[in-house]
Amino acid sequence: PRWFEDAGRVMDLEARLLPCMPTLQGRSREEATKRVFGNDDRPSEMEYLSAYIAGESRGVRMSPGIGHPAEQAAFELGRQLFFHRAGPWDFSCASCHGEEGKRIRMQDLPVLSRPQFAQPVVSTWPAYRVSNSQFKTMQWRINDCYRQMRMPEPNFVSETTIAMNMYLAVTGRGATYRGPGTKR
C-alpha cells in the first residue's frame, strides 16, 4: 500500500485495480465490485488479476510507503485496529496473532506485530488456498478474519482493510516478495 496522488488516497493492490475497471473497461463500479471474492465454483476476476500483477513483483524487496502523512495515518489506524477488541467474542487480530505458539486446528498463527513473523506472511499474498483450490487476496484474508471473529464484514477496499494491509505491510517491510504463495 502507498499514497497515490492521482486518487488522493492510500491504496493497496485491489484498491488501485478497482478504478481501472470503469475507466479503462467502461464498467460501472457496481458491476466491477459485484463479485470481488470467488466462491466454491471459481475465483473472481479481481483475485485472478491480483495474483497475476503480484507475480510480476516476485523477487522485489517490499517497501510500502510510510513517508506521506496519509500513509502514516493509515499505518497508525491499522495498528489500532490490530489491537482493538470488539464483537461478540471480544476478539482483536492480536487475540490470535499476538502470542507465539498459538494454533487453530493444525495451523500455526504467526505473531503479525513482529517483523520476523509478518515478513513471510505479507511476502506471499495473494495466495493459492489449498483448502478451497483458489487464489485469494489479502482483502479476502482480512475480511475472512473479521468473519471468524463474528464482526461485521468490512467493505471491499475500505479505509479499514487498506489500513490493516498497510500495518501488516509496514511491519513486514524489507522482505523479498515470494508470491503468489500457497496457504492451507
Image (tube, rainbow, N blue to C red):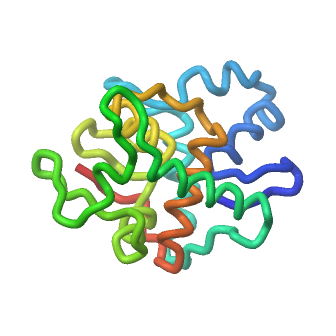
Residue 78 percent across, percent down from the top left: 56, 53
Q: Residue furthest right?
A: 6
Q: Is residue 37 above or below residue 112?
A: above
Instruction: Judge by depth and name the residue closer to the eye, 69 or 133.
Output: 69
Please tell me in which quadrant of the rendered image residue 98 appears: bottom left
Q: Residue at x 81, y 27 (%)?
A: 26
| Side (left or right) of 6 relative to 10 | right
Q: Is residue 135 left or right of residue 44?
A: left
Q: Quadrant of residue 3?
A: bottom right
Is residue 3 positioned above or below 60 on the image? above
Q: Nearer the viewer, residue 18 or 148?
A: 148
Quadrant (top left, top right, bottom left, bottom right) of the N terminus: bottom right
Q: Position of residue 72 (x, y in %)?
A: 70, 64
The residue drawn where x is 41% and y is 35% is: 146
Residue 42: in sight, yes or no?
Answer: no
The image shows a total of numbered marks equal to: 0
Give the residue at the far left of this rendering.
106
> Does residue 141 appear to the left or right of 48 in the view shown?
left
Taking 89 as reference, is 17 above or below it? Answer: below
Query: Which residue is drawn at the image coordinates 35% and 36% (left, top)?
Result: 90
Tell me residue 183's x, y (percent). Answer: 28, 53
Which residue is painted at 60% across and 42% down in the image? 160
Q: Is residue 8 visible?
A: yes
